[in-house]
Amino acid sequence: MMNLNEESLKVHREHNGKLATIPKAKLEDAHDLSVLYTPGVAEPCRKIKDDKDLSFEYTCRGNMVAVVSDGTRVLGLGNIGPEAGIPVMEGKSVLYKVFADVDAIPVCLDTSDKDKFIETVRYLQPNFAGINLEDIESPKCYDIEDALIEKMDIPVFHDDQHGTAIACAAALLGALRLVKKDIAEVKIVANGAGAAGTAIVRLLLNLGAKHITMINSKGAMYEGMDMSRINRVQAELLKETNLEKKQGSLADIAKGADVILGVSKPGVFTADIIKNMNKDAIVLAMANPDPETSYADAKAAGARVVGTGRSDAPNQVNNVLVFPGLFRGAIDVRARKINDEMKKAAVYAIANLIPDEELREDYVIPGAFDPNVAPAVAAAVAKAAMDTGVARIKVDPEDVRKETLERTKKLREILKTIR
């Protein structure tokens, strides 16, 4: 019997990857050829020449996202290069299609130079409705995303940062509702201050959290610490976190904490740390592929609610809950960017899918295959984009929800025929 790695190699080899392109219109005779290609194709070209935004209507651009990476920080594998990063970007593209009927393609760039990366992606803008940045080393990823948001007129979204943050925040809101605690009152410890960790902290602050302490490999972080080890994003967050300037190790800072969040490394949330937390403790251990603690170990140590990034345990905190629906909503209104209000809308859309009466210790966040997630996120994001003025067109959010649900339902029926 094959193990998971062997089976994955077999599937990738047999299918020559996981993606293919297929036409949307029939091509069976000379008339079809004239309509799809020359001479008929000249007419949409003329229309787009007069109004570039018509490229969203007359071409695949209107439903197309690029998943862009340089392969410098792929999964837990590190800097493995652009070619080795393709399977991940290709897999992400599959998830876009299956969960929200968004067409996506992997684009792995053969450069680790920040400025060349930015310039290359900027030139791709006419082809896409959005850019999903993926698996780019920190702190370079911050500069790349900021520059591209500034230079481009389509959404640019670094999923390792914000997708993780949105999923984590949704799980936390569900857990807090269950244990009846207020986000503004709880003591939160965030272990890991890289791209994902800082994005989580920023989003939680935007959602009303008041008492957060970030931890790096040296211990508690605070404003005024050795700045040679602090990047610009961390420095900004330290103005709003650990205002008491507490110092110490993870074990020290986690004493009496209500919540500990991990985007760090395996095994660092020990039983003693969890036992010393506050009553009804919440533990979200999201290191990939092996979390800071297992679900079973954290529960045995006394945590009330536990979530991890793993699919073989309850309360999976997974980006797939976020990016398909988020981009579905953004491109359905032809958004120019993804802003903080759209991210918050996605958080609440995911968290509120579970009514209070259905919340359980092992069910504070919807599952990855819940068919209602992407439609709910798409509708909420589309509305937030329109409300904040970054949408090019107006639509009914309820229509977005219904159409997303119907599109994905039909697509999954088709996918059942794949061998």
Image (cartoon, rainbow, N blue to C red):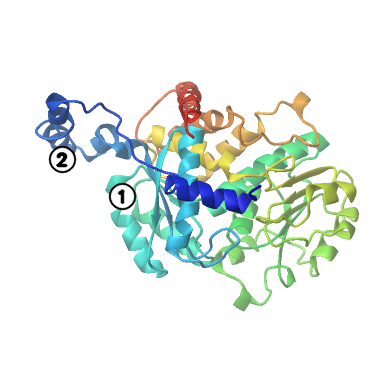
- What amino acid is labelled 2 in the image? Lys
Which residue is disc 2 drawn over? Answer: 49
Looking at marks 1 and 2 on the same chain, the residue that comes earlier in the sequence is marked by: 2
Q: Residue furthest left?
A: 39
* Element type at mark 2: helix
Disc 2 packing (10 Å; few <14; some 14–19; many ≥20): few
Residue 32: x percent and y percent? 17, 26
Comparing 85 with 364, the one in front is: 85
Q: Position of residue 402 (x, y in %)?
A: 49, 21
Give the residue displayed 82% in from the left and 62% down from the top: 253
In front of the other: 298 or 399: 298
Q: Is residue 282 left or right of residue 222?
A: right
Residue at 43%, 61% (x, y): give it. 83
Can the viewer see residue 157 in this picture?
no
Q: Which residue is disc 1 drawn over?
A: 125
Q: How many marks?
A: 2
The image shows residue 287, relative to residue 381, as above or below, that is below
Q: Find the distance from the CA under tag 1 to the CA under tag 2.
A: 16 Å
**Badge 1 element:** helix
Residue at 58%, 31% in the rendered image: 373
Q: Which mark is residue 171?
A: none
The three-letter amino acid code for the residue at tag 1 is Gln
Q: Are marks 1 and 2 in contact (CB under 8 Å)?
A: no
Residue nearer the viewer, 15 or 359: 15
Does residue 12 appear to the left or right of 304 in the view shown?
A: left
297 or 211, which lies in front? 297
**Where in the figure is residue 63, as x and y percent of width and height?**
36, 36
Residue 184 located left or right of residue 135: right
Whether residue 136 is visible to the viewer of this picture, yes or no, is yes
- How far from the left and from the top, in percent, is residue 341? 53, 41
Badge 1 local density, few (<14 within 10 Å), some, or many (20+)? some
